[in-house]
Image (tube, rainbow, N blue to C red):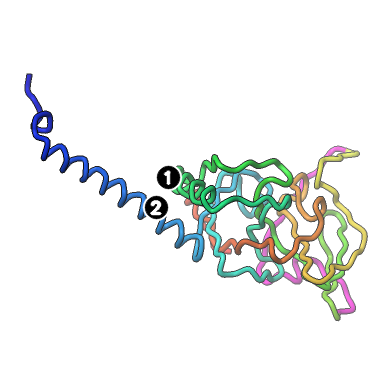
Amino acid sequence: MKQSVYEYSYEMKEKRRKRTIRRIAVVLCIGLVLTVAMDFLLFPVFVRSDSMESGISANSAVFVTPLDKSPKRGQVFYISRSDGQTFSTAAKIRNALFRLFTAQQFSPFEYSDSTTGTESIRRVLALPGDSIYMKDYILYIKPEGSEHFLSEFELAEKPYDIHIYDVPENWDSIGSSDSMEERKLSKDEYFVLADNRIHAVDSRHFGPVKGERFLGRVILEYFPFRKFRVF
């Protein structure tokens, strides 16, 4: 039987062991550098739900920049968990590495639930000081200092579509209300909605969000490639 030189050469076994350790260290360092760079400049987010249809489809991936945390009307933002749960630095690093090497599919050191225990992507439609009401799933906004209400589409900087379809009579799914009485947003309150207005959870359910919860602006959908678009 042919023997490998590593079976009887201690020196060569040591060289192979050190070479393997160096390769593993290089891979880990690259992963950490990329993770840190993405946390400060640009990071990917995998979208599992259809809450932003037809703007962002389910099972797609977008890039978010944390450099922009000052929303304008109509922009799409990545928002932190509404339950206030935070994680240790070690847990964040472990999750970042898992996401890096699994194409954003797994974050095993976090928990989530459908309403409070997960980050979300939502469109920012009303700013602090605005007066708002909703009719037939469309938000109407009177900016502070203005005398008239305008529709969300008239005030947004860029055009977008929302997903609305007929629902059964007496439909009572969470977050699906098609109307809302007039209210005024307080200081540092932002009203966010999903593009899928029928069953997604948004400010109709959990109320306005504070500015501190904005993690970054969605700037690009890059997967699937056929739906590549810039926001």
Give the label, 2 or 1, closer to the camera. Answer: 2
Label 2 Cα neighbours within 10 Å, binned few <14 / some 14-19 / many ≥20: some
Q: Are marks 2 and 1 in contact (CB under 8 Å)?
A: yes
Name which residue type carries label 1: Phe
Name the one closer to the observer, 71 or 25. Answer: 25
Q: Magenta segment, which residues?
A: 146-168
Q: How many numbered marks, from 0 up?
A: 2
* Above/below status of 188 relative to 12: below
Q: Position of residue 84 (x, y in %)?
A: 71, 53
Question: At numbered mark 2, what does the secondary structure look like: helix, strand or loop?
Answer: helix
Q: Quadrant of residue 5?
A: top left
Mark 2 → mark 1, Cα distance in angstroms: 8 Å
Which of the two labelled residues, at mark 2 and mark 1, occupies the earlier sequence position?
A: 2
Name the one closer to the observer, 33 or 171. Answer: 33
Q: Position of residue 176 (x, y in %)?
A: 81, 46
Residue 154: in magenta span = yes
Q: Residue at left 15%, top 37%? A: 13
Residue 209: in magenta span = no
Residue pointed to by mark 1: 101
The residue lying furthest to the right in this view is 181
Q: Residue at left 79%, top 66%? A: 189
91 lies left or right of 191: left
Q: Position of residue 141 (x, y in %)?
A: 83, 68
Name which residue type carries label 2: Gly
Question: At numbered mark 1, what does the secondary structure look like: helix, strand or loop?
Answer: helix
106 lies left or right of 128: left
Residue pointed to by mark 2: 31
* Above/below status of 85 relative to 108: below
Q: What predominant SS class does the magenta segment belong to? A: loop
Q: Position of residue 170 (x, y in %)?
A: 90, 39
Q: Quadrant of residue 193?
A: bottom right
